[in-house]
Image: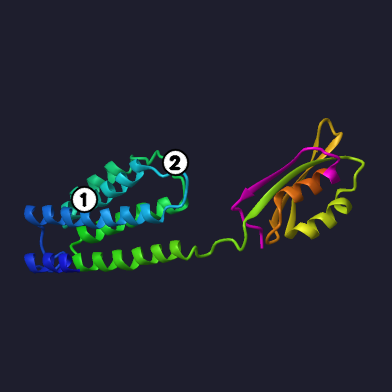
Amino acid sequence: MILANFFNDLFQSTPGSETPGPAEVALAMAYSLVLNLIIALIYRMTYKGTRYSQDYVQTLIIIGVVTTILIMVVSGNGAIAFGMFAAFSVIRFRRTLGQSRDLAFVFFAMSIGMVVGARHYSMAAVILGVVGLAIILLSVTNAFAPRKASHLMTMRLTNDIDFEKILAPILEKFTDRSQLMRVTSAQAGMMTELSYGLQLKEGVSTSEFLEALQLASGNNRVVITPTAAEFDS
């Protein structure tokens, strides 16, 4: 807020009232850089995946600063704005984003860049504070996480086994919830392959659960995979 007020006091102009001069553009770029560095720090602090990319974080900062430059340059000049729109319409973002939140951070950086470029310096600081705090709180509290870690189970049984009857007591003992997701034929129709979505009970031993499934299947192939996927409502 202090830095934002410094900008407003320094130029003593109403946003959008006149074309910014070189000094204001340079200082606005520096201000945008500071704000986007904070966004990058928030991203790194709250990241929980396994594909963290330094290149992506640096790109966030660059996107925010460049957006500020573009907004300030095209201010009040329709011809330049149209030309830039035509040029940027052919650009494609070719990196595959690891998480959905990565896209949200791209919009976050661009939004801050736009607000600074529009010369709403105090507003940019407020937006960064509110949105940044919300992101940190969502990360710290692990908001909207699944109630329990869920699992995907795949197993094979011979065709002479009534799998619903055999598996019902095992699933009742070891899981809070189960959902049959797929039934397919395997090994030239000699076996049946089942796929289940599961939520294991609290404190259940995965090895005991696996042993019970193998006994029921006649020691055929059983695969249990931890996953963050949720059940259909």
Q: Residue at x 61, y 53 (%)?
A: 229
The spot of residue 212 in percent (x, y) is 81, 48
Disc number for residue 96 = 2
Displayed quadrant of residue 120:
bottom left
Could you say which quadrant of the image residue 217 lies in? top right
Q: Is residue 21 visible?
A: no
Task: Give the residue at the far right of this rendering.
Answer: 160
Q: Amino acid at mark 2?
A: Thr
Question: The magenta stretch spans which residues?
Answer: 215-233
Q: CA distance from mark 2 to mark 1?
A: 25 Å
Percent position (x, y) of residue 75?
A: 17, 56
Total number of numbered discs in the rendering: 2
Residue 206: numbered disc:
none
**Circle 1: residue type:** Leu
Check residue 228 for magenta coloring: yes
- Residue 150 visible: yes
Q: Nearer the viewer, mark 2 or mark 1?
A: 2
Figure quadrant of the C terminus: bottom right
> What residue appears at the point 41 percent right and 51 percent down from the top-left corner?
103
Whether residue 106 appears in magenta in the rendering, the answer is no
